[in-house]
Amino acid sequence: MQACLDRIAALEPEVQAWAFLDRDRALEQARAADAQRKEGKGIGPLHGVPIGIKDIIDTADMPTEHGSAVFKGRRPYEDAACITALRRAGAVILGKTVTTELATLTPSRTRNPVNLEHTPGGSSSGSAAAVAAGMVPLAVGTQTGGSVIRPAAFCGVYGFKPTFGVIPRFGVLTQSPALDTVGVFGRSIEDVALTVDALQAYDERDAASLSTSRPRLLATATQDWPLPPLLAFVKTHAWNDADAATREAFGELVEALGGQVTEITLDNTIESGLASAKKVQDVEMAAHYGPLLDRAPDLFSQGLAARIEEGRRVQGTDYFAALSARERFYASTSEIFLDYGTILTPAALGPAPKDHGTTGSPVFCAFWTYLGVPAVTLPLLETDGMPMGIQLVGPRRDDGRLLRSARWLVQHLQAGTA
């Protein structure tokens, strides 16, 4: 814990990843964890591990201000479900990481620790940056469009968005109930699997929470493949908008993987699905944020206010059509998952833009969030010193096998056999 605090003291003035820190409380919890271990008492899978928490997730002993002046000084009266689970696993909540305004596209003050002139992405800006800077080994974020996968790719860390409903969202700011998903950042596949194992649960207070059995992800992720997995390379309609460096890097990657990867076209499906995803997010954002905008319009950025008004203009029939179309779009991808198991695709248009006025585009992420499928980004590519993420996507509730494929790919490329 002291090492993490020393790292924060050294780098936080420039990176600005934290919305709230209580150093004394963190050390107190760390000492208590040490004492418990010395006494031979049972410990959890995350015993004493410092974790950063996105500042839209309620913590009873820390402020939760949602990155907005509307909630300045807000103190929740109880922990979110995922915070309760982390504490039960023995984790130490080090502090609250910076989020963009109400977890949307408005940039935050956080800088990319790889290069401070570049954006860290969003909306889980502080969570990705804190892990990338070595301030914490793990952090929790959320994704409604691309808010875990994109910042993880920009900052060069592992980001995992599990199947929709695996991690309960009670106590997490509601932006879009049909899309909001809790995810994690870490320094390895094993770390993110271990963390989601501790977080996954059924919670009747979250209507989307899955009540089915949950196999242990770490156990599955660390199994060896009897044969190398097959991957389907999906460029999507956004491929031509991607940076030249992205197209070149993925071309080399696909060539190196040889027979393990096959290119599949889903351009029309994904483009139509993204339009539906946007309608769903806009309407639900307007429903949940609209009353706040009416009450305190001066405390909203112009961009977010415009997005809320856009959502208010969507017809109810169009919203329900977009929501119900999700299963049809998922069915169109099912054959790919049956034949290949895992989809390979970029995590973002390119490396983090050299622009603090943007968090980057979620165009390579939002369709998969809309479908509710698990996705993981791997920090295995780079250009001009900036990381680029490889995104892998799997079928719903097959998170463990997705992470097993991801681990195989990491080992395969790091061993230099590709």
Image: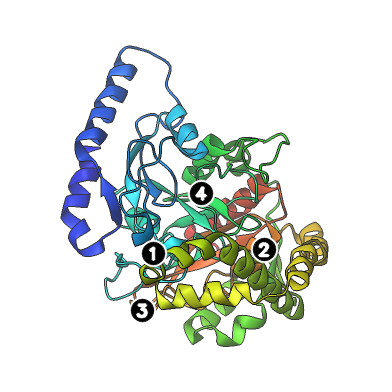
> Callout 3: 10 Å neighbours few (<14), some, many (20+)?
some
Which residue bears the numbered disc 2?
370
Q: How packed is label 2: few (under 14 Cα within 10 Å), some, or many (20 or more)?
A: many
Check disc 3 and report the residue beneath it.
357
Mark 1, secondary structure of its residue = helix
Residue 256 horizontal/vertical position (percent): 59, 71
User: What residue would you read off at disc 1?
Assistant: 155
The amino acid on which the numbered mark 4 sits, given as a three-letter code, is: Ile
User: Upstream in the sequence, badge 1 or badge 3?
Assistant: 1
Mark identifier at residue 223: none
* Residue type, numbered disc 1: Cys
Instruction: Give the spatial CA distance, label 2 vs label 3.
Output: 26 Å
Q: Quadrant of residue 269?
A: bottom right
Q: Residues within 10 Å of mark 1 (few under 14, many from 20)?
A: many
Q: Which mark is residue 189?
A: 4
Considering only vertical position in the picture, is 136 above or below 371?
A: above
Please name which of the two marks, 1 or 2, marks the residue nearer to the observer.
Answer: 2
Foreground label between 1 and 3: 3
Sequence-wise first label, 1 or 2:
1
